[in-house]
Amino acid sequence: MSASDTLEFNPFLPEVHEDPYPLYHRLRAEDPVHRSPLGFWVLTRHADVLALLRDPRMSRDPRRSRRVEQLRASAELDELLAAEEAAPSMLFVDPPDHTRLRTLVNKAFTPVAVERLRPRVEAIVAELLDRVAGAGAMDVVEDLAYPLPVTVICELFGVPEADRDRFRAWSRGLVHLLDPLVAEDALERALRARLALRGYLRELIAERRAHPAGDLLTALIAAEDQGHQLSEAELVSMCVLLLVAGHETTVNLIANGLLALVRDPGARARLQADPALAGSAVEELLRYDSPVQFTSRHARTDLDIGDRHIQAGETVVAVLGAANRDPAQFPDPDRLDLARKPNRHLAFGGGIHFCLGAPLARMEAGIAIPALLARLSALELAGPPVRRDTVTLRGLASLPVTFRAAA
Ligand code: HEM
C-alpha cells in the first residue's frame, strides 16, 4: 500500500506494480466493490469476480463502454480504433458473434489436440536447456520462458522464423492496449503496432492462400473461403489474438512461476523430489502470481453489485489476481502450496470467455518448469528480477539466475 491512507486502486504506483497483493487484501476487506478515481469499478472478491464473468448483463465489447466513446474525440485515435473495430476478435465480442468465432478454433485447442504437440514441446524445451546448461547462468525469460511459447504458437500458425523478431516488437507494443488506462501517446503507439501487425498478417494470409500448408492458418483460410464463416478482417483479428496471446501470457506463467520457486527453496525441493506434483504445481503458480491480473466488462444495463449501483455503459474491472488470493476461497492464500486442493483459481477467467489456450499453456509450463528443475540445481538469483511495465499482464522482462547443471 502507498504511504497515504486513502484506499485507491492504482496499479501503476511503483510499489503496487512490484507487489499488488497487500493492496488487493485491503480493497477486498474494506471496499470490495470499489469506485476507482480512474473512472471504473473494481472487484476483488472471488465470488464477485466469478459472478461478473458469468453475468449475461455484462458485455465484453468495448464499443459498449463510455470511455471508448470519449477517446473518439481525437480524430486520429478514432481512425486507428476503427481498423480493428470493424471486425473485433472473439475476446471483444458477445454472442452470437463470440460463439461463431470461438467454434471455428475450438477444435485446435482442446486438451486432446494440444496433447499431440507434447513431443514437440518437450523437444523445444530440451533444446533450449541444452543451450544454457553448460554456462552455469541464464536469463529465464530470454532463454526459456519467452522462446518456448513463441516457437510453439508460430509453428502452429506457420509464421516463418525470420519474421519472429518483428512480431515480438509489435506484440510488445500492442499489449499496452489491455491496460486499464494508457496515456494517449502510448495508446497511439500501441494502435500503430496493431495496425502494422495486421498488415503483416494480411500478407502472410495472401501467401498461404497461394501456397496452402498443413497449419492452423491454412485451416482458418479454408473456413473463410469455403464456409463464409468469417470475413477476412475477422480472420486477421483472430490471428492477432491467438498469436499475441501465445506470445505474451505463458511467458509470464513460466517466469513468475520460476521466480516464486527460486524464492521458496522448500517448495522447489518438493517439486524436484516429486515430479508427479507438476500438474497441481502449475495450477498453484497460476493462482499465486497470476499472469493476467485483470479483465473488464461493460454494463449493458443499470445493475447492482453488493450495495453499489452500476450504470449502463460503466466499466467493471475484475481483479483476477485478487480473487486468486481471497482467503474466503483459499485458506492461507499468500502461501505457495504446490499440492493445494481444491484450487478454483480464476487465472484463466471464467464464463464464456474462459481462456481458449489454457490446455496449451498448462502443457507448456507443465513441461518447462519441471524440466528446468530436473536439469539445473542450486538455482539462485544472479541479480534483481526486472518487471515488465504492463499492469494487466504481470510478468518479468528479465530473471537472471545461476545454477549447477545436474549430472
Ligand atoms: C498462462 C497463460 C495464459 C493465461 C494466464 C491466459 C489468461 C486468459 C484469460 C484471463 C482470458 C479471459 C479474458 C476475459 O474473460 O476477458 C483468456 C482468454 C483467451 N485466451 Fe488466454 N491465457 C493464457 C494463454 C493463452 C494462450 C497460449 C492462448 C492461445 C494460444 C490463449 C488464447 C486466448 C483466447 C483466444 C482467449 C479469448 C477466449 C474468448 O474470448 O472466448 N491464451 N486468457
Image: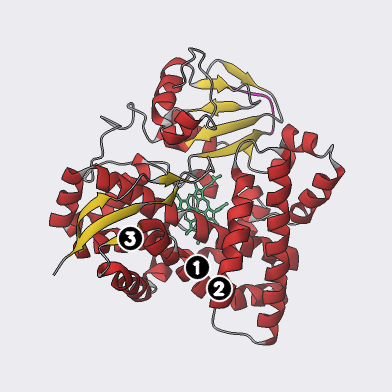
Give the residue pinned by disc 1. Answer: 153
Could you say whether the residue bearing mark 2 is in a helix, strand or loop? helix
Could you say whether the residue bearing mark 1 is in a helix, strand or loop? helix
Could you say whether the residue bearing mark 3 is in a helix, strand or loop? strand
Q: CA gap, disc 3 to disc 1?
A: 23 Å
Position of the C terminus, as image quadrant, is bottom left
Does 50 appear in magenta? no
Left or right, 335 with reference to 168 = left
Give the residue pinned by disc 3. Answer: 138
Q: CA gap, disc 3 to disc 2?
A: 29 Å
Q: What kind of residue is marked 3?
A: Met
Give how far across and how far down residue 148 sits, in percent.
Answer: 41, 66
Quadrant position of residue 170: bottom right
Q: Does residue 157 lie above or below 67 as drawn?
A: below
Stretch of the chain drawn in magenta = 300-305
Q: Are marks 2 and 1 in contact (CB under 8 Å)?
A: yes
Give how far across and how far down residue 15 sits, in percent.
Answer: 45, 29
Give how far across and how far down residue 363 sits, in percent.
Answer: 35, 62
Q: What kind of residue is marked 1?
A: Ile
Badge 2 crowding class, 10 Å Cα cut-off, few under 14, some 14 to 19, many 20 or more, is: many
